[in-house]
Image (cartoon, helix red, strand yellow):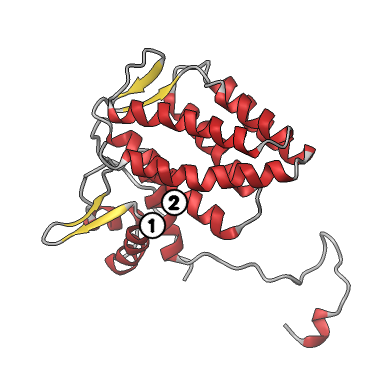
């Protein structure tokens, strides 16, 4: 773009020029998105090997960018590299669950306290919308949207703080929570009834009581961890065993 173009007024809809350049995702970026989506949806089962040749063929890419994309997911903790056995989807067993929720509590309790220091009606409304969505989907029989709505509530709680690093950290922890759910011996299951701690959390933030908000999270996480470790008995769950089935990736177009 010439310098003179940068200062010209923008004509809406009819301008042939793009004033703000749009960054395009690379082939590796697209591969990462597809692999991450497959892992977090349970389409690539925990502990299963990453079939490089088959996946690369289905995606329509060479093994080089596929390996580069896979290494990014190793850094994210979604894949693990096992010497002599290649890359596999990470498994998070019951022994790791308590530490996972301890880490989540550290991040989310801090976020709740920060929000409680400056209660904001707009931010509260966003949490209310997330809770309403969770309540709505919990009436169904499909655990996937219930689990998604639950994780989205917690993601929004942290994102509202406005810290890029905190948001990145909770994104990793929530991904690990999903993998821990897939790793459970009874398959992927979610709680059918919505815990009252969600309501208590929002009310505490509105009241400016950060300690009460953190305590609501603590009790919620204790219950969740007990379910994933098999230490508690829960009848109000929606369950779908993880079944190993061949996954067919959609071919992506290379834009490099």
Please determine whether, in this image, residue 89 is positioned above or below residue 201: below
Give me the C-alpha separation between circle 2 and circle 1: 7 Å
SS of the residue under disc 1 = helix
Q: Residue furthest top?
A: 235
Q: Earlier in the sequence, mark 2 or mark 1?
A: 1
Crowd class of label 2 (few under 14; some 14 to 19; many from 20; radius 10 Å): some
Q: Position of residue 12 (x, y in %)?
A: 85, 61
Residue 221: mark in rendering: none
The residue where tag 1 is placed is: 76
Quadrant of the image containing the N terminus:
bottom right
Which x, y percent locates residue 196? 56, 20
Q: Nearer the viewer, residue 122 or 51?
A: 122
Q: Is residue 24 above or below residue 237?
A: below
Q: Secondary structure at mark 2?
A: helix
Relative to 130, is 17 on the left or the right?
A: right
Identify the residue position indicated by label 2 in the image.
Answer: 172
Closest to the observer, 98 or 82:
98
Q: Is residue 231 above or below residue 89?
A: above
Q: Residue at x 88, y 72 (%)?
A: 9
Along the viewing direction, whichever of 52 and 148 lies nearer the viewer = 148
Task: Point out residue 35 in the picture as x, y percentages from the top left corner.
Answer: 37, 51
Quarter assignment of residue 188: top left
- At a point 87% along the width and 77% down the height, the residue shown is 8
- Residue drawn at (64%, 25%) of the image: 132
Residue in view at x 41 percent, y 25 percent: 190
Check if mark 2's residue and mark 1's residue have beta carbons within 8 Å. Answer: yes
């Amino acid at each position: 773009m010439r310098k003179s173009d940068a200062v010209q007024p923008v004509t809406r809809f009819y301008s042939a020029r793009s004033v703000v350049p749009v960054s395009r995702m690379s082939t590796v970026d697209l591969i990462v998105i597809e692999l991450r989506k497959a892992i977090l949806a349970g389409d690539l089962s925990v502990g299963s090997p990453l079939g490089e040749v088959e996946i690369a063929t289905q995606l329509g890419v060479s093994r080089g960018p596929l390996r580069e994309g896979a290494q990014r997911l190793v850094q994210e903790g979604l894949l693990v590299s096992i010497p002599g056995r290649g890359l596999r989807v990470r498994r998070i067993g019951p022994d790791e669950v308590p530490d996972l929720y301890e880490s989540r509590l550290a991040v989310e309790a801090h976020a709740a306290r920060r929000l409680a220091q400056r209660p904001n009606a707009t931010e509260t409304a966003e949490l209310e919308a997330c809770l309403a969505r969770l309540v709505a989907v919990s009436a169904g029989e499909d655990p996937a949207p219930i689990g998604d709505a639950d994780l989205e509530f917690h993601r929004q709680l942290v994102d509202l703080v406005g810290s890029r690093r905190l948001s990145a950290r909770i994104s990793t922890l929530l991904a690990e929570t999903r993998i821990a759910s897939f790793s459970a011996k009874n398959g992927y299951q979610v709680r059918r009834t919505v815990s009252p701690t969600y309501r208590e959390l929002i009310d505490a933030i509105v009241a400016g009581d950060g300690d009460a908000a953190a305590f609501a999270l603590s009790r919620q996480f204790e219950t969740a961890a007990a379910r994933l470790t098999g230490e508690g008995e829960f009848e109000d769950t929606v369950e779908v065993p993880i079944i190993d089935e061949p996954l067919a990736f959609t071919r992506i177009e290379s834009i490099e």
